[in-house]
Image (spheres, grey):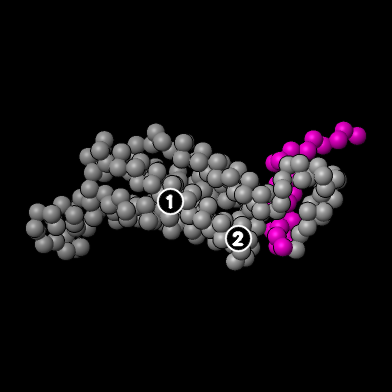
């Protein structure tokens, strides 16, 4: 029987499974080594401790998430941008449910607030990317020039947070419903950008019944 090649990725995958099930403080390095059928010295060759494993696991997921934004870099329509960001995050969180549950358990431990800091850095980076992408679309296409960048970014952040929590609680997500929500949101944003905002800037009073 061919022996499985031990890699950092394989070790982290098993460790995250155990952390997710029992909590990081209830899993020993010895248990991780035994579950992989390797010696403790071999395990310590790759990782000095459990926190080292978690940081590596998080960096792997952060790198994977960054690839989402590489894929949307050439999108030139706000509606398509919104739906693609939602779809890609839905797929990402579906692939990584165990990681999500594991990270939430770890965040609850006061001595491991470093994970919150790392998560916030990724979140801020991703939000900035989305805002820049929206601004790029606005500069190129007149249809979107008055769209509220902050509003669209906040909507996407809310949907992403929803996806995370639903996966954490192991609840089923209706992606078609999210797409319908995105359509309704975009229509509202376009109404604001076409009627409300220009009228406000020109000092014209306008009510919603006139806008729709």
According to the image, label 2 marks what residue? 112
Query: What is the magenta range?
Result: 1-25
Instruction: Tell me the quadrant of the picture where the N terminus can be found.
Output: top right
In the image, residue 157 lies at what x, y percent?
A: 43, 55
Q: Who is closer to the viewer here, 43 or 153?
A: 43
**Residue lying at 27% horizontally and 52% vertically, measured from the top left:** 148
**Residue lying at 53% horizontally and 52% vertically, measured from the top left:** 118
Q: Who is closer to the viewer here, 182 or 62?
A: 62
Mark 2 or 1 closer to N-term? Answer: 2
According to the image, label 1 marks what residue? 124
Tell me where residue 167 sits by quadrant. Answer: bottom right
In the image, residue 83 lies at what x, y percent?
A: 43, 46
Residue 12 in magenta stretch: yes
| Mark 2 vs 1: CB contact within 8 A | no
**Residue lying at 82% horizontally and 37% vertically, measured from the top left:** 4
Dot 1: what SS? helix
């Amino acid at each position: 029987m061919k022996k499985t090649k031990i890699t950092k990725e394989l070790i982290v995958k098993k460790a995250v499974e155990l952390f997710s099930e029992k909590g990081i403080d209830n899993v020993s390095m010895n248990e991780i080594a035994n579950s992989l059928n390797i010696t403790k010295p071999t395990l310590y060759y790759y990782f000095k401790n459990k926190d080292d494993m978690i940081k590596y696991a998080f960096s792997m997921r952060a790198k994977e998430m960054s690839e989402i934004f590489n894929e949307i870099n050439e999108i030139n329509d706000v509606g398509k941008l919104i739906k693609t960001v939602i779809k890609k995050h839905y797929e990402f969180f579906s692939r990584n449910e165990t990681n999500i549950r594991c990270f939430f358990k770890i965040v609850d431990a006061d001595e491991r607030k470093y994970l919150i800091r790392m998560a916030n850095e990724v979140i801020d980076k991703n939000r900035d990317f989305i805002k820049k992408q929206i601004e790029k679309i606005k500069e190129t296409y007149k249809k979107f020039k008055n769209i509220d960048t902050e509003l669209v970014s906040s909507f996407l952040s809310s949907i992403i947070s929803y996806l995370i929590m639903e996966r954490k609680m192991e609840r089923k997500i209706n992606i078609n419903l999210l797409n319908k929500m995105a359509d309704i949101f975009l229509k509202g944003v376009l109404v604001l950008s076409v009627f409300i905002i220009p009228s406000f800037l020109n000092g014209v009073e306008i009510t919603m019944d006139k806008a729709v």
